[in-house]
Image (cartoon, rainbow, N blue to C red):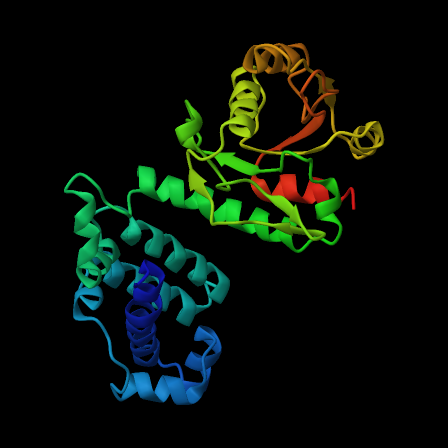
Amino acid sequence: MKFVEEIVVEEFLPTVRSMLAGELRERGLTQSQVADVLGISQSAVSKYAHGDVSTNHRIATDERVEAVVEELAEGLAAGHVTPVQALIEIEVLVRDLETGGDLLAQLHEEAVPELDDYGASFRVHDPESELRTSERVLSSLRRGLRLLENASGFAGLLPAVGSNLVACTPDAADVDDVAGVPGRIFDVKGKATIPADPEFGVSEHVATVLLAARGGGADVAAATNIRYDPKLVAELLDRGHVAAEFDESGDVGRSVREAIESEPETTVLYQTGGMGIEPLIYVLGSDPESVADSIRSLL
């Protein structure tokens, strides 16, 4: 497994630093001055100067890289460009070269030929590719789950039916576009237990509530459920949430949509139960981390 960031660290940065060091030395800067400008040691500058650092020829001969290096070297040497401004320019260049089909993307795909298994129409470096979007959702969800798993007392908020933390893609249309924990989160001997890594399409109930809230106009992308207690609802209200009650005995989706349509700023939904229905609170948020933070504020 090799990430594109490793290509940046192992090949792009040494090459660009070497090029910058050479350009700055040609403009009369001493090794000490070059080291200060680039934020590296003098010994590193010396290695660049003597060719002791491996560089990538394709990166070094790319016209855009050459142009940026020359422009930055001239500005840094004359004092018109600060090291921070140079850093920003290089960051922008990196992002441009990472996008689908460009130089860093090509180098990454050559280093990881298995990416071809996803088909000719797929490129992992396309900013809006489905896989990249899905991986961002899963990564955010894993962070949110870690926050909850490590929160002391979270097990005490779990309902008898179990809990789930879910998150959806920006254009989510159904439960297959919502990621969650397979099997839900349960209290096992006083500890919240997450049985497996999150996946898409494994949550039906909490995912349905999230999708219905979005369908009603809520600007949210994540949700979780906890046990119902009027004191918990009151605490969430005190922390700035907007709460609305809905009826879970009938069409849950329609009931949630109607509640949200009445108050689009709602971030807490709750139902007080009924025959065979456990009362629950649903906390909504822009991402799993913010939902987890809301839950942790109750502990």
266 lies left or right of 117: right
**Where is 188 relative to 45, above or below?**
above
Give the residue displayed 37% in from the left and 84% down from the top. 45
Residue most extreme to the left = 120
Give the residue displayed 48% in from the left and 49% down from the top. 196
Question: Closer to the camera, 202 or 177?
Answer: 202
- Quarter the N terminus occupies: bottom left
**Location of residue 178 by image quarter:** top left
Position of residue 237 measured from the top left corner of the image (x, y, whole percent): 80, 29
Question: Closer to the camera, 197 or 63?
Answer: 197
Give the residue displayed 71% in from the left and 47% down from the top. 154
Position of residue 38 measured from the top left corner of the image (x, y, whole percent): 43, 74
Tally of numbered discs:
0
**Where is 234 relative to 137, above or below?**
above
**Location of residue 185 by image quarter:** top right
Position of residue 297 measured from the top left corner of the image (x, y, whole percent): 76, 44
**Location of residue 229 by image quarter:** top right
Residue most extreme to the front = 276
